Image: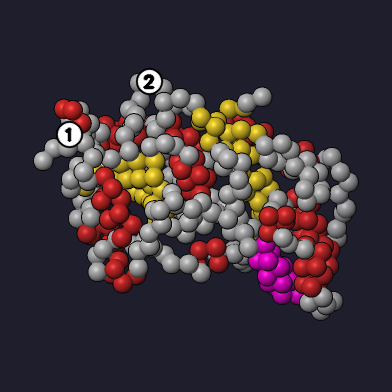
Amino acid sequence: MRIPTTILLTLIAIMPAFLSSCHDEPEYSDTIYGNFDALCDIVDTRYCFFKEKDLDWVKITKAYREQITPETNSMELFFICAAMLDELKDGHVNLTSRYNTSYYRKWWSDYPQDFNLRTIEENYLEFNWLTTSGIMYKQLPGEIAYIYYPSFFYIISETSLDYILAILHKSRGLIIDIRNNGGGALTNIKTLVGRLISEKITGGYIMHKTGPGHEDFSKPFPIEYEPAEDWHVKWDGPVVLLTNRSCFSAANDFTAVMKSLPNVTVVGARTGGGGGLPFSSELPNGWGVRFSACPLLDSSMQCTEFGIDPTEGYEVHASDEELAQGKDAILDRAIEMLKDLPLPGDDEGETEK
């Protein structure tokens, strides 16, 4: 059975509550040890990437539990728990108290940035661009369309997207730049991809937990994407998607879907991953814990947690030195790929001189 994307994600969203009723859950006291053990159990029974990351959760929790004493205070406990969660190496994992939210940053901080927005604004857009639905866009010299989408938290209006594509339609190719996009709403993927396809596609798969075991998962459910309605403006020409390590979560998922399309080339660096749909729970003391619960797979049913590589042969890096001098090697590569392609409607497909 194939389930529409929006319905599927809604069903997955309620699955943790359903799962909690399918097996006995121990009750923990609001004490230093009780809160620590509650956190360990929540992650043990609900986190989804133990196998992929070859993690021994029993060994990890034992080591951090030994750091706790009856004299450990609440703030000390928080940082012990946060350090333990960092062992998961997952940007979707957070522990939240009234005074701090832990966050694993090494998924991007240990890698080159490959991006500088000021360089693009000044040297490629010349401080002159259009903006709607959080999207910056302009036709670059040489009739090349450029879109910068900084965050999937910006909800893309269908009407705004019609205007963007109508304004950019007389272009040799389309560059979609999502570098430094840390994710957001998955529904925006559906909106964007719908303008680039002419028939329904399976863009990936999702699984959910079916029990407390580390390998207790459902079969993969297909995530389908449908073309936008006929009255919307579409793009059927070549597309170059620009990525860097700071593309995470929904931006990672978008890259996986886009890479499967025949008219799309992914240029830049491997994305930062975040291939698990996150969910939240609560400890007895009120602290919140968020974690990856449902693995997202690409169209070939491969794990996306560790990032999506550029199209083979198109890995490019933009050094800090070059960016400071006004040169973006990743964007330059995309422009070079598109600059000699014909404009839409050119007679016999010849490029205008």
Q: In terms of sequence position, does the residue under pointer 1 or pointer 2 come before the other?
A: 2
Q: 172 or 212, which lies in front?
A: 172
Looking at the rendering, which quadrant does residue 64 occupy? bottom right
Placement of the C terminus among the 4 image quadrants:
top left
Residue corresponding to mark 2: 230
Q: Can residue 228 be seen in this snapshot?
A: no
Kindly tell me whether residue 334 is visible in this rendering. yes
Badge 1: residue crowd in 10 Å (few <14, some 14–19, many ≥20): few
Q: Specify the segment rendered in magenta.
A: 72-88
Numbered circle sitting on residue 350: 1
Q: Amino acid at mark 1?
A: Glu
Q: Position of residue 48 (x, y in %)?
A: 70, 50
* Magenta-drawn stretch contains 80: yes
Q: Position of residue 38 (x, y in %)?
A: 80, 59
Residue that protrudes farthest toward the top in the picture: 230
Asked whether 160 falls inside the magenta stretch, the response is no
The residue positioned 46% from the left and 43% from the top of the image is 259
